[in-house]
Amino acid sequence: MGALLPWRPFRELERMMRRMDSPFRFLEEFPEITEDALVPAVESFVKDGNLVVRADVPGMEPKDIDVSILGNVLTVKGERRSEQEVKKEDYLRREVSYGSFERRMTLPDGAAADKVRASFKNGVLEITVPMAKETVAKKVPVEPEAEKKVEIAKK
């Protein structure tokens, strides 16, 4: 489950080229802002029959985050606003991204969209989605294959 972003096959190459632009990039006022500058890291896993989705949103408040479900798509969106305490010319380095973000994840079949819960603690948004028992993944053991011995006939 990841962000829905336009496919750009050379995205990593573009990033590397920008980094190599100047060996003194850290002295520049602000690094270039890319379209995916603010995309919170997300992890998802199944625990006790529930799908749990966690998103890192440090520096944000619960009132700045919107969680919604339409059909089988879970949407998390929000905005991280810049505090204007420090003047632009006083920055030595600025790597924190500000602005709006939106992440969408497809929920598995059997997810109880009407029973979704969301909580927020220490900059981590946690969304719990109850799942039907038949949709919970089961562990499949991996069995080693016996090595085949090849006998070489002597002439």
Image (tube, rainbow, N blue to C red):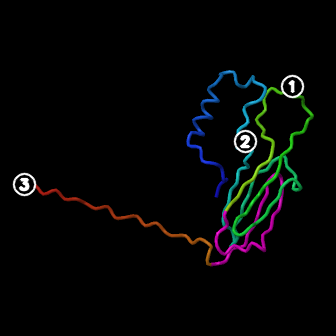
| Magenta region | 106-133
Image location (x, y in percent) of residue 30: 77, 29
Of labels 2 and 3, the one closer to you: 2
- Residue at 22% across / 59% down in the picture? 150
Q: Is residue 136 above or below residue 27?
A: below
Q: Mark 1 or 2 closer to N-term?
A: 2
Residue at mark 1 to residue at mark 3: CA–CA distance: 84 Å
Q: Mark 2 — residue?
A: 37
Residue at 81 percent across and 41 percent down: it is 98
Q: Quadrant of the N terminus?
A: bottom right
Q: Is residue 97 left or right of residue 138?
A: right
Residue 54 x, y percent position in the rendering: 73, 58
The tag earlier along the polypeptide, 2 or 3, is 2
> Identity of the amino acid at label 3?
Lys
Q: What residue do we see at 60% from left, 32% from top?
A: 16
Tell me if label 1 and label 2 are in contact, CB under 8 Å.
no
Horizontal placement of 30 versus 143: left or right?
A: right
* Neighbourhood count class around disc 3 (C-alpha, 10 Å): few under 14, some 14–19, many 20 upward: few
The secondary structure type at the circle numbered 2 is: loop
What number is the disc on residue 155?
Answer: 3
Q: Element at badge 3?
A: loop
Q: CA distance from mark 2 to mark 3?
A: 69 Å
The amino acid sitting under disc 1 is Asp
Using the rendered view, name the quadrant where residue 96 is placed: top right
- Please, what is the three-letter code of the amino acid marked with disc 2? Ala
Q: Is residue 109 magenta?
A: yes
The residue that mark 1 highlights is 90
Which quarter of the figure has residue 14? top right
**Quadrant in the rendering for residue 151:** bottom left
Question: Badge 2 local density, few (<14 within 10 Å), some, or many (20+)?
Answer: some
In the rendered structure, does residue 12 fall within the stretch colored magenta?
A: no
Q: Quadrant of the C terminus?
A: bottom left
